[in-house]
Every structure is written in structure tokens, then in C-alpha cells.
Image (cartoon, rainbow, N blue to C red):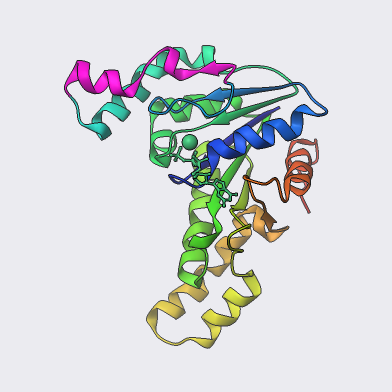
Amino acid sequence: MNILILGHAGSGKSTLVKNFGEYLVANYSVRRVNLDPATRPIFKADADCREFVKTEEVMEKFKLGINGALLKSIEILGKHIHDLILEDDFVLYDTPGQLELFLYTDFGERFSEKLKGNAVAIFLIDSSLCQTPENYLSAVFQSAVVSLRTSIPTLTVFNKTDIKKPLPYSEIERLIEKSEGVLSEAMVNLLPFYNLTSLRYRTIEISAQNGDGFDDLFSAVNEVLCACGDIS
Ligand SMILES: Nc1nc2c(ncn2[C@@H]2O[C@H](COP(=O)(O)OP(=O)(O)OP(=O)(O)O)[C@@H](O)[C@H]2O)c(=O)[nH]1
Ligand SMILES: [Mg+2]
């Protein structure tokens, strides 16, 4: 079973791979894969893309700035996809900090295609960024984009809840309906997009740092991966 972890810079992807990996290891055989060419993994990586390309070396060699070098690194990794897909009870994949390096590249597209069928994606969101209806909805849309771009069933997961919890959805609806103006009207029309995400079934709130919510995350992953794909 493959678990692909995506999210914005600093949302806690690597911490989740490390600590959720340790959680799973109590009962399963687990492997971890680093797909971030710019960062040395904080977990023991069973496959590491930095064996094939290191962004700091690409900057030097091709005289590129950081963004150009990241794109070049990902392009180079396109030749090594088969080295970076492992098999085990669970394989956790840590992706680059910049979400678009996976979502909007040939590498990401081909990688997702190879995982498809036996994979779940986790779109990790820093809960402190979901404190207003606008912010919450933008996270919802991005989660829908992740599932559309990867074609992998995607769980929307709120992280860092040891610091702050996201606003509850009922509160979002209430705040939007109470407010007035063009933005509010537009947002009411966008609310159904919520149903394109796993949030329609349940909100998964975790702390990748201290392990809160891992039982719930584990159940949701299994429910997605079971034949019925029903996470209700
Ligand atoms: N309080 C708290 N801090 C967290 C949690 N998860 C991650 N962090 C912290 O957030 C920071 C970023 O965590 P990372 O795991 O490196 O996040 P990332 O998404 O891999 O970051 P990039 O790969 O750079 O995009 C680190 O300082 C972590 O210790 C959490 O659940 N709670
Ligand atoms: Mg990371």
C-alpha cells in the first residue's frame, strides 16, 4: 500500500513520514521514500532521490537559481521513477516542499500513474492556515486539485492541531452565510466543492509531531484502500 504525502512547504510532510512510519512499524513492515531532492531526509529513507540528484549540486553544475535547479532536479528524477517505487505493507512517500514540483510536472504525473490503484494521497494542511472561511475554502480547493491532478483518492488532513485546530465546517458555512458582499456570494457558490474532498465524510485532525489522531488517519487510509473505497 502506497501513501503519497503532499502539502505546502512546512506543512509537516517529512515529520509525518517519520512519525506515522514509526506508528505503523509497530504492526507492519514499512518503507519510507524521500522524493525531495533539496533536503536530506529526517527519517531513515529506504530509497532516497538524493542518491540520483542533489539540488545544491544542480545549482552549481547548471548555474541555476533555486527554482530552476529544483525543476531540473525533478526532470532528472524522471529517469529514476522505478528506483523510487517500493513494495511493502506500507510505503510512505515524502514529496518536495514546493507542491507544484510534484503536481505540475511530468515526473509527478508519471509517478502518480505508477502508484495508482494501490495508493492513497494525503494532502496535509497546516491548521493555522484554516482559520477564516476564505483560507479554509482555499485549502479545500487545493485538496480537490491534488486529487484531480494525481487521480489518486485523497484524504484532506489537518496537521499541527497541537497548536491550533481548523475552524469547523459548520462555522465556515455560518460565517459565509452571515456575511454580505460579492466575495461572500461567490463563496456560497463554491461550498459544494467541499463534497469533492474527503472532508464530506469526516475531518481528520492530527499532530504529526506528537501522534495525535494517527489511529483515525490509519482507519481512513485503510477505508480508502479497501475494495469499497468508502471512508464514510
Ligand atoms: N507543533 C507542531 N509542529 C509540527 C508538526 N508537524 C510538523 N511540525 C513542525 O513544522 C516544521 C516543518 O515540518 P516538516 O516536517 O519539515 O514539514 P515539510 O512539509 O516536510 O517541510 P518542507 O519539506 O520544507 O516543505 C518543523 O519545525 C516541524 O517540527 C505538528 O504536528 N505540530
Ligand atoms: Mg519535508
- Residue 22 image offset from top left, x and y in percent: 71, 31
Image coordinates of residue 159 in percent, x first then y, are: 59, 52
Residue 58 is one of the magenta-drawn residues: yes
Give the left or right position of residue 190, taking residue 70 as reference. Answer: right
Q: Is residue 151 visible?
A: no
211 is higher (above) or lower (below) than 40: below
Locate residue 121: give its quadrant: top right
Q: Residue furthest left?
A: 63
Quadrant in which residue 17 is drawn: top right
Image quarter hosting the N terminus: top right
Q: Quadrant for residue 40, please give it.
A: top left
Question: Would residue 185 be counted in the magenta stretch?
Answer: no
Q: Nearer the viewer, residue 232 or 101?
A: 101
Count of marks placed on residues: 0
Residue 228 location (% of width, % of height): 80, 41
Residue 146 on image: x %, y %: 51, 44
Give me the residue at 38% from left, 81% from top. 182
Task: Say if residue 55 shows up in the picture.
Answer: yes
Which range of residues does the magenta coloring cover?
Answer: 45-63
Relative horizontal placement of residue 105, taking residue 226 as reference (left or right): left
Side of 69 where 39 appears, left or right: right
Quarter of the image with the C terminus in it = bottom right
Which residue is outermost to the right? 27
Residue at position x 59%, y 16% in the image:
46
Task: Say above or below: 105 vs 156.
Answer: above
Query: Is the residue 70 above or below the residue 192 in the image?
Result: above
